[in-house]
Amino acid sequence: MIIFGIDPGSRISGFGIIECKSGTFKHINHGSIHLETELGFADRMLELSGSLQGLLQKYQPEVVVIEKIFLGKNADSAFKLGHARGVAILEAARSGARVVEYATRVVKKGLTGHGGADKDSVQLFVQRILALKEIRQIDASDALALALYHGFLVERPHLKGVEI
C-alpha cells in the first residue's frame, strides 16, 4: 500500500510517501512544495493544486493522510491553512485515493508516546523508522510522520504495541 502524507501550508506544504508492505515501511520520497510568496493567495493555491496533482498522479497512493487544522493564535493564518487543506483534500479525492485526517497531537502521541512531543523528536523517530540519514525539511518530516502513523497504527492494527 502506498501512503501519501501531506502537511499543508499556504507558503510551504510538506509531502511524504511511503510503502507499507507486510508490516514494514519503505521510504519512497519526501519534500516540500515552496509556493511563490510574491504571488497572490489564490495563485499560490492554484500552484499548490498543480503540484499536488502531479505528485498524486506520479505515485498513485491508495491513501492520502492530511494533517487536521489546529487553532493557533492568528485567525488569518488558520483560515489560510484551512484553504490549503481544502486544496489538498480536493486533489487527494480527485486522485481516487481514500482521504483520512489526523490531528497533530494524535500523531505525535501515537508515534512517540507523547502528544506534546517537539518536532525534532518526531523527526528523529521518522528518520529511525525509515532508515534515513536526515530529513532537511520539517514539513516533509511531519508529512512522513502522518503517513507512518496511518500505516503503523491504523492500516496494520496487529502491530500496535510492537516495539520498533
Image: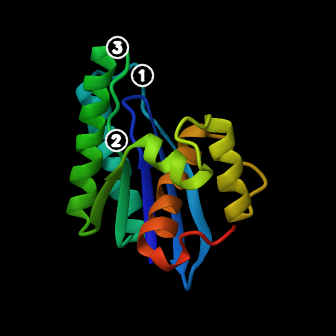
Q: Quadrant of residue 138?
A: top right
Q: Which residue is mark 1?
A: 37
Q: Which residue is mark 2?
A: 48
Where does the image place residue 10, in percent across and percent down from the top left?
A: 36, 30
Q: Which residue is mark 3?
A: 74
Q: Distance from label 2 to label 3 (Cα)?
A: 22 Å
- Residue displayed at 28% across by 58% down: 92
- Seen in the image, is 130 located left or right of residue 14? right
Which structural element holds mark 3?
loop
- Residue displayed at 32% across by 48% down: 50
In front: label 1 or label 3: 3
Q: Farthest residue in the bottom direction?
A: 22
- Seen in the image, is 98 located left or right of residue 121? left
Tally of marks: 3
Where does the image place residue 102, in percent across and percent down from the top left?
A: 37, 50
Q: Distance from label 1 to label 3 (Cα)?
A: 19 Å
Q: Quadrant of residue 37?
A: top left
- Residue displayed at 53% across by 61% down: 148
**Where is the N terminus found, in terms of image quarters?**
bottom left
- Residue displayed at 52% across by 56% down: 16
Give whichever of discs 2 and 3 has the lower sequence position.
Answer: 2
User: Relative to 59, does residue 117 appear above or below in the rendering?
Assistant: above
User: Relative to 23, does residue 92 appear above or below in the rendering?
Assistant: above
Give whichever of discs 1 and 3 has the lower sequence position.
Answer: 1
Give whichever of discs 2 and 1 has the lower sequence position.
Answer: 1
